[in-house]
Image: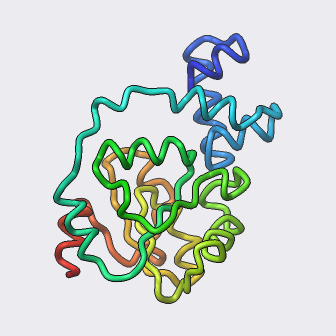
Amino acid sequence: MGAFIARRFNLSPEAARDLQKSYFRTYGTTLRGLMTEHDIAPEDFLEYVHDIDFGVLTPDLRLKAVLEKLKGPKYIYTNASRPYTDKVLAKIGLDGIFDGIFAIESADYLPKPHDQSYHRMAEDMGLDPEKSVMVEDMAQNLAPASRMGMTTVWVPTGQKWSAAGHRPEYIDHTAPDLTEWLESQL
């Protein structure tokens, strides 16, 4: 992201990173900031930042096994693009597990934690929020899900961004190890 911004605006790496973080904090995603402030085409940005080496990812057979045991439909709601999400799922062995993906394109590039995108996701996926569970690694992204009546599960990463906006009133469960937590729910 920083390299895209540095090249696009002829900035130093440090200045580009500062701008990227500022947009992330203000708009929820760097992309939304670039679209709002500079009318950047989302496809250009996503194609650039998602052109990465997926070789560091490996199949997660334990997570796959527990997901396969869960009853009911399973969906992904992501601020990433659909092609990127498909690549990640394939690399970690979870392709074919989910009943649908609501990617950033599906939300007309309005990212989590905007309430409108949550409502659109629920409508598009046919979800009853009162019977749904939202799992998320960014605490602030659980607030809209909680307001809709979803049960929420925060998966802290140990990174500062993961805990940003953390409020106990909209986090029902904390799962430092998602697979372990899911296994305990079966």
107 up-or-down from 150: above or below: above
**Compared to 50, does 111 lie above or below?**
below
Q: How many marks can you see?
A: 0
Location of the N terminus by quadrant is top right
Tell me residue 108's x, y (percent): 73, 54
Image coordinates of residue 47 in percent, x first then y, are: 60, 30
Q: Quadrant of the C terminus?
A: bottom left
Q: Which is nearer the eye, 75 or 170?
A: 75
Q: Identify which residue is drawn at 66% across, 77% down.
A: 123
User: Residue at the spot x=65%, y=22% of the render?
Assistant: 5
Q: Is residue 29 left or right of residue 131?
A: right
Q: Residue at point 61% right, 60% down?
A: 113
**Residue 17 versus residue 111: which sits nearer the camera?**
111
User: x%, y% of residue 83?
Assistant: 53, 43
Looking at the image, residue 84 lies above or below residue 129: above
- Is residue 171 depicted above or below 162 in this figure? below
Residue 38: which quarter of the image? top right
Q: Nearer the viewer, residue 14 or 40?
A: 40
> Quarter of the image holding residue 46?
top right
Q: Is residue 84 left or right of residue 67?
A: right
Seen at 66% across and 39% down, the residue is 31
As drawn, the residue found furthest toward the bottom would be 130
